[in-house]
Amino acid sequence: MSSSTTTHIDLLRHGDTGHRSYRGQLDDTLLELGWRQMRDAVLGREWDVIVSSPLQRCAAFAQELAQSRGLPLALEPALREYHFGDWQGRTVDAIAANEGEALARFWADPVAYPPPGAERFVDFANRLTGAVGDLLRTYPGRRVLVVTHGGVIRLLRCLAAGRRYTDLLNIDVAHASLHALPWPPKPPRDAVDAPRGDDARHEAARADPVDG
Protein backbone atom coordinates (compact mmCIF):
# COMPACT_ATOMS: atom_id res chain seq x y z
CA MET A 1 0.00 0.00 0.00
CA SER A 2 1.20 3.52 -0.79
CA SER A 3 2.22 5.65 2.22
CA SER A 4 1.47 8.93 0.40
CA THR A 5 -1.62 10.98 1.21
CA THR A 6 -2.16 11.48 -2.53
CA THR A 7 -4.53 9.15 -4.36
CA HIS A 8 -3.04 7.83 -7.60
CA ILE A 9 -5.55 6.83 -10.26
CA ASP A 10 -4.72 4.79 -13.35
CA LEU A 11 -7.34 4.30 -16.05
CA LEU A 12 -7.30 1.02 -17.99
CA ARG A 13 -9.38 0.63 -21.12
CA HIS A 14 -10.87 -2.81 -21.73
CA GLY A 15 -9.39 -5.08 -24.39
CA ASP A 16 -10.69 -5.88 -27.86
CA THR A 17 -14.28 -7.14 -28.15
CA GLY A 18 -14.19 -7.64 -31.91
CA HIS A 19 -16.84 -4.97 -32.53
CA ARG A 20 -16.22 -1.90 -34.68
CA SER A 21 -19.33 0.09 -33.98
CA TYR A 22 -20.62 2.44 -31.31
CA ARG A 23 -21.01 0.00 -28.41
CA GLY A 24 -21.86 2.45 -25.64
CA GLN A 25 -23.62 0.58 -22.86
CA LEU A 26 -24.17 -2.64 -24.80
CA ASP A 27 -22.75 -5.44 -22.66
CA ASP A 28 -20.15 -7.14 -24.85
CA THR A 29 -17.66 -9.82 -23.86
CA LEU A 30 -13.93 -9.71 -24.52
CA LEU A 31 -12.25 -11.66 -27.28
CA GLU A 32 -9.45 -13.96 -26.14
CA LEU A 33 -7.20 -11.31 -27.70
CA GLY A 34 -8.79 -8.76 -25.40
CA TRP A 35 -8.04 -10.89 -22.35
CA ARG A 36 -4.40 -11.22 -23.42
CA GLN A 37 -4.13 -7.48 -24.02
CA MET A 38 -5.40 -6.67 -20.53
CA ARG A 39 -3.28 -9.29 -18.78
CA ASP A 40 -0.19 -7.96 -20.55
CA ALA A 41 -1.08 -4.36 -19.67
CA VAL A 42 -0.97 -4.94 -15.92
CA LEU A 43 2.22 -6.99 -15.74
CA GLY A 44 4.67 -5.46 -13.28
CA ARG A 45 2.18 -2.86 -12.07
CA GLU A 46 0.79 -2.65 -8.55
CA TRP A 47 -2.39 -1.17 -7.10
CA ASP A 48 -4.17 -1.23 -3.75
CA VAL A 49 -7.75 -1.39 -5.02
CA ILE A 50 -9.61 -1.96 -8.28
CA VAL A 51 -12.75 -0.08 -9.34
CA SER A 52 -14.52 -1.11 -12.54
CA SER A 53 -17.38 -0.34 -14.83
CA PRO A 54 -20.00 -3.07 -14.34
CA LEU A 55 -20.12 -3.84 -18.07
CA GLN A 56 -18.59 -7.27 -18.54
CA ARG A 57 -15.86 -6.22 -21.00
CA CYS A 58 -14.38 -4.39 -17.99
CA ALA A 59 -15.78 -6.19 -14.95
CA ALA A 60 -14.82 -9.75 -15.95
CA PHE A 61 -11.13 -8.86 -16.16
CA ALA A 62 -11.31 -6.68 -13.03
CA GLN A 63 -12.74 -9.63 -11.09
CA GLU A 64 -10.00 -11.95 -12.36
CA LEU A 65 -7.26 -9.46 -11.45
CA ALA A 66 -8.71 -8.73 -8.01
CA GLN A 67 -8.97 -12.44 -7.19
CA SER A 68 -5.48 -13.26 -8.44
CA ARG A 69 -3.89 -10.45 -6.41
CA GLY A 70 -6.14 -10.49 -3.36
CA LEU A 71 -7.30 -6.90 -3.92
CA PRO A 72 -10.63 -5.31 -3.07
CA LEU A 73 -12.93 -4.69 -6.05
CA ALA A 74 -15.81 -2.28 -6.42
CA LEU A 75 -18.15 -2.06 -9.42
CA GLU A 76 -19.17 1.52 -10.13
CA PRO A 77 -22.12 2.14 -12.51
CA ALA A 78 -21.01 5.77 -13.03
CA LEU A 79 -17.95 4.45 -14.91
CA ARG A 80 -20.03 2.92 -17.72
CA GLU A 81 -19.46 4.12 -21.27
CA TYR A 82 -21.39 7.01 -22.83
CA HIS A 83 -24.86 5.98 -23.96
CA PHE A 84 -25.06 6.59 -27.72
CA GLY A 85 -28.85 6.33 -27.92
CA ASP A 86 -30.07 5.33 -31.39
CA TRP A 87 -26.48 5.01 -32.62
CA GLN A 88 -25.52 2.16 -30.30
CA GLY A 89 -24.55 -0.93 -32.28
CA ARG A 90 -24.11 1.06 -35.53
CA THR A 91 -20.83 1.69 -37.34
CA VAL A 92 -19.53 5.18 -38.03
CA ASP A 93 -19.71 4.47 -41.79
CA ALA A 94 -23.38 3.49 -41.56
CA ILE A 95 -24.24 6.59 -39.57
CA ALA A 96 -22.24 8.82 -41.91
CA ALA A 97 -24.07 7.39 -44.92
CA ASN A 98 -27.54 8.07 -43.51
CA GLU A 99 -27.07 10.80 -40.91
CA GLY A 100 -23.87 12.49 -42.00
CA GLU A 101 -24.86 15.99 -40.94
CA ALA A 102 -25.96 14.79 -37.51
CA LEU A 103 -22.65 12.94 -37.09
CA ALA A 104 -20.70 16.04 -38.12
CA ARG A 105 -22.62 18.19 -35.65
CA PHE A 106 -22.04 15.69 -32.84
CA TRP A 107 -18.29 15.66 -33.36
CA ALA A 108 -18.14 19.44 -33.81
CA ASP A 109 -20.08 20.07 -30.60
CA PRO A 110 -21.14 16.98 -28.58
CA VAL A 111 -22.63 19.17 -25.87
CA ALA A 112 -25.13 20.85 -28.19
CA TYR A 113 -25.69 17.98 -30.64
CA PRO A 114 -25.77 14.53 -28.99
CA PRO A 115 -26.90 11.49 -31.00
CA PRO A 116 -30.67 10.98 -31.13
CA GLY A 117 -31.88 9.47 -27.87
CA ALA A 118 -28.39 9.65 -26.35
CA GLU A 119 -27.18 10.64 -22.93
CA ARG A 120 -26.70 14.38 -22.57
CA PHE A 121 -23.02 15.13 -22.72
CA VAL A 122 -23.17 17.33 -19.65
CA ASP A 123 -24.71 14.40 -17.74
CA PHE A 124 -21.89 12.14 -18.95
CA ALA A 125 -19.28 14.65 -17.75
CA ASN A 126 -21.04 15.16 -14.43
CA ARG A 127 -21.29 11.44 -13.63
CA LEU A 128 -17.61 10.93 -14.43
CA THR A 129 -16.36 13.86 -12.36
CA GLY A 130 -18.65 12.69 -9.57
CA ALA A 131 -17.18 9.19 -9.80
CA VAL A 132 -13.61 10.55 -9.59
CA GLY A 133 -14.56 12.66 -6.60
CA ASP A 134 -15.96 9.58 -4.89
CA LEU A 135 -12.72 7.68 -5.58
CA LEU A 136 -10.64 10.42 -3.98
CA ARG A 137 -12.85 10.52 -0.89
CA THR A 138 -13.12 6.73 -0.55
CA TYR A 139 -9.49 5.80 -1.23
CA PRO A 140 -7.24 8.58 0.13
CA GLY A 141 -3.57 7.79 -0.35
CA ARG A 142 -4.29 4.61 -2.31
CA ARG A 143 -3.22 3.43 -5.75
CA VAL A 144 -6.48 2.86 -7.63
CA LEU A 145 -6.88 1.00 -10.91
CA VAL A 146 -10.04 2.03 -12.77
CA VAL A 147 -11.11 -0.40 -15.49
CA THR A 148 -13.36 1.44 -17.90
CA HIS A 149 -14.06 2.52 -21.48
CA GLY A 150 -12.55 4.54 -24.29
CA GLY A 151 -15.05 7.40 -24.14
CA VAL A 152 -14.73 7.63 -20.36
CA ILE A 153 -10.95 7.84 -20.57
CA ARG A 154 -11.01 10.40 -23.38
CA LEU A 155 -13.36 12.69 -21.50
CA LEU A 156 -11.50 12.40 -18.19
CA ARG A 157 -8.21 13.12 -19.93
CA CYS A 158 -9.79 16.13 -21.66
CA LEU A 159 -11.03 17.46 -18.33
CA ALA A 160 -7.75 16.76 -16.53
CA ALA A 161 -5.77 18.67 -19.16
CA GLY A 162 -8.25 21.55 -19.44
CA ARG A 163 -8.97 20.71 -23.09
CA ARG A 164 -12.17 21.31 -25.04
CA TYR A 165 -14.60 18.45 -25.57
CA THR A 166 -13.87 18.63 -29.32
CA ASP A 167 -10.30 17.50 -28.49
CA LEU A 168 -11.72 14.04 -27.73
CA LEU A 169 -11.02 13.20 -31.37
CA ASN A 170 -7.31 13.76 -30.89
CA ILE A 171 -6.81 11.57 -27.82
CA ASP A 172 -5.53 8.07 -28.53
CA VAL A 173 -6.95 5.41 -26.22
CA ALA A 174 -5.96 2.00 -27.54
CA HIS A 175 -7.44 -1.24 -26.27
CA ALA A 176 -5.95 -2.21 -22.88
CA SER A 177 -4.00 1.05 -22.65
CA LEU A 178 -3.14 2.56 -19.24
CA HIS A 179 -3.49 6.27 -18.51
CA ALA A 180 -2.48 8.06 -15.32
CA LEU A 181 -5.17 10.56 -14.30
CA PRO A 182 -3.94 13.77 -12.68
CA TRP A 183 -6.70 15.41 -10.65
CA PRO A 184 -8.12 18.02 -10.03
CA PRO A 185 -8.54 19.22 -13.63
CA LYS A 186 -6.63 22.15 -15.05
CA PRO A 187 -8.62 25.31 -15.90
CA PRO A 188 -10.18 25.10 -19.38
CA ARG A 189 -8.09 26.44 -22.23
CA ASP A 190 -9.19 29.31 -24.43
CA ALA A 191 -11.81 28.36 -27.01
CA VAL A 192 -10.63 27.20 -30.42
CA ASP A 193 -12.54 26.59 -33.60
CA ALA A 194 -14.16 23.18 -33.82
CA PRO A 195 -14.12 21.16 -37.06
CA ARG A 196 -17.17 21.73 -39.24
CA GLY A 197 -18.94 20.07 -42.15
CA ASP A 198 -16.87 17.60 -44.17
CA ASP A 199 -13.83 18.16 -41.93
CA ALA A 200 -15.81 17.02 -38.88
CA ARG A 201 -17.12 13.95 -40.72
CA HIS A 202 -13.57 13.07 -41.74
CA GLU A 203 -12.30 13.48 -38.18
CA ALA A 204 -15.11 11.32 -36.80
CA ALA A 205 -14.44 8.58 -39.33
CA ARG A 206 -10.73 8.35 -38.53
CA ALA A 207 -11.16 8.61 -34.75
CA ASP A 208 -11.78 5.53 -32.61
CA PRO A 209 -14.65 6.38 -30.25
CA VAL A 210 -16.31 3.04 -31.04
CA ASP A 211 -16.10 -0.30 -29.24
CA GLY A 212 -16.05 1.75 -26.02
Image (tube, rainbow, N blue to C red):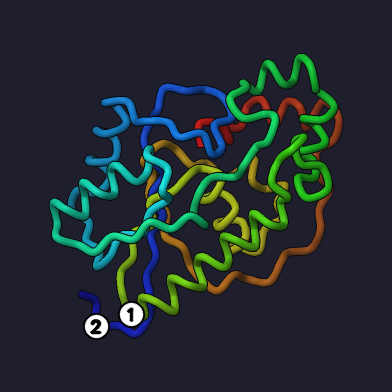
As helix, strand or loop, the secondary structure at mark 1 comes to loop
**The one of 199 and 79 positioned closer to us in this rendering:** 79
In x, y percent, where is residue 198?
82, 25
- Is the N terminus in the top left, top right, bottom left or bottom right quadrant? bottom left
As helix, strand or loop, the secondary structure at mark 2 comes to loop
Q: Residue at x 28, y 65 (%)?
A: 49
Quarter assignment of residue 106: top right
Residue 135 drawn above or below residue 86:
below
Mark 1 or mark 2: name the one nearer the start of the chain. 2
Counting the numbered discs, the total is 2
Q: Residue at x 68, y 57 (%)?
A: 123
Q: Residue at x 29, y 40 (%)?
A: 38
Q: Residue at x 36, y 80 (%)?
A: 140
Quarter assignment of residue 135: bottom left
In x, y percent, where is residue 32?
26, 26
Left or right? Give the position of 151 relative to 6: right
Q: Which mark is residue 95?
A: none
Q: Within 10 angstroms of label 1, few (less than 14), some, or many (20 or more) residues? A: some
**What residue is disc 2 on?**
3
Residue 209 drawn above or below residue 179:
above
**What residue is disc 1 on?**
141
Quarter assignment of residue 76: bottom left
Left or right? Give the position of 88 relative to 10: right
In x, y percent, where is residue 102?
82, 30
Disc 2 residue type (three-letter) = Ser
Left or right? Give the position of 124 relative to 97: left
Please say if the residues under marks 1 and 2 sit with CB atoms less than 8 Å apart: yes
Q: Within 10 angstroms of label 2, few (less than 14), some, or many (20 or more) residues? A: few
**The one of 30 and 38 positioned closer to us in this rendering:** 30
Tell me the CA gap for discs 1 and 2.
7 Å
Disc 1 residue type (three-letter) = Gly
